[in-house]
Amino acid sequence: MNNLLIIDGLNLVRRIHAALPDENDITTVTNKTLSACHSLIGTHSPSHVIVVWDGDAESWRKKLYADYKKGRKPMPEALANGLEGIKASLAEQHIHSLDAASEADDVIATLALKVAEKGKVVIVSTDKGFSQLPQNNLLLWDYFKKAEFDLLAYEQKLGVQQHQLLDFIALAGDSGNKIPGINGIGPKSAADLLSKFRNLANLYRSLDNLGAKQAKKLADGKDMARLSYKLGQLQTNIPLNINLKQFRLSQTSK
């Protein structure tokens, strides 16, 4: 059985880099990244390891909604210039990379669900967007907390269940990624509505059961809800054109 460790490359190195006093110290970033990868391999004992990196192409989400991730700080220049060296150092340790065309998230999701059909998968990332993926044979791991992502605590924090996460984003948006949601519907209102109506489809079939003001907000925002749902949803059918054998972990990597 394959046991795949997927590391969200930029998610890892940007946090390592942000914690350093000297942003030009890419040697330390490289060493800490190598150390993190070896630590993760030791913890999870995978048969295969892939470090997935974001690419430079404009994402389909940005094309669909121009304000997607608007205002997010660009990668520091020193780190951007040092990425190829970091990837090369990983490759020397037989830890291989896969470059996404744009956002790594969809590539990671596609890989994870494909392998989880017959094997086990660990995704290493602090990105809570991966929590929408089915948990069968799939573990989300936070390297910095050295702990599994606590889905139950996350559900309790938002006030929804896992299968409602995308409906929640459709209604309330996602401020971190500048996904808009419906104007005037905040997280608490979204959670309350989903608690009562269970899902977006039932909610929109039941607008007559709501107060006039809230019903109008939902009716007026239906197209934005549909857009927000799509922006929040991970794509799991991205063409990859890779062979998993390329990423088999050799004994020298352990």
Image (cartoon, rainbow, N blue to C red):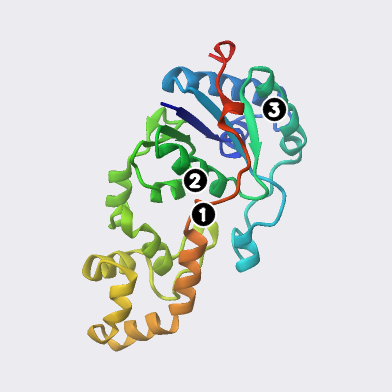
Q: Compute the Cα span from label 2 to label 1.
A: 7 Å
Residue picked out by circle 1: 235
Residue picked out by circle 2: 109
In the rendered image, residue 184, in percent from the top left (x then y), is placed at 41, 75
Q: Amino acid at mark 2?
A: Ala
Q: Amino acid at mark 3?
A: Ile
Label 1 packing within 10 angstroms: few (<14), some (14-19), many (20+): some
Q: Compute the Cα span from label 3 to label 1.
A: 27 Å
Q: Quadrant of residue 183?
A: bottom left
Q: Considering only vertical position in the picture, is 82 above or below 42?
A: below
Q: Residue at x 54, y 47 (%)?
A: 105
Label 2 packing within 10 angstroms: few (<14), some (14-19), many (20+): many
Residue picked out by circle 3: 86
In the rendered image, residue 66, in percent from the top left (x then y), is placed at 64, 67
Task: Kindly state the secondary structure of the residue where label 1 is placed.
Answer: loop
Q: Considering only vertical position in the picture, is 48 above or below 81?
A: above
Mark 2 and mark 3 lie on one chain; the one further toward the N terminus is: 3
Q: Amino acid at mark 1?
A: Gln
Along the horizontal axis of the image, is 172 left or right of 247? left
Mark 3 and mark 1 lie on one chain; the one further toward the N terminus is: 3
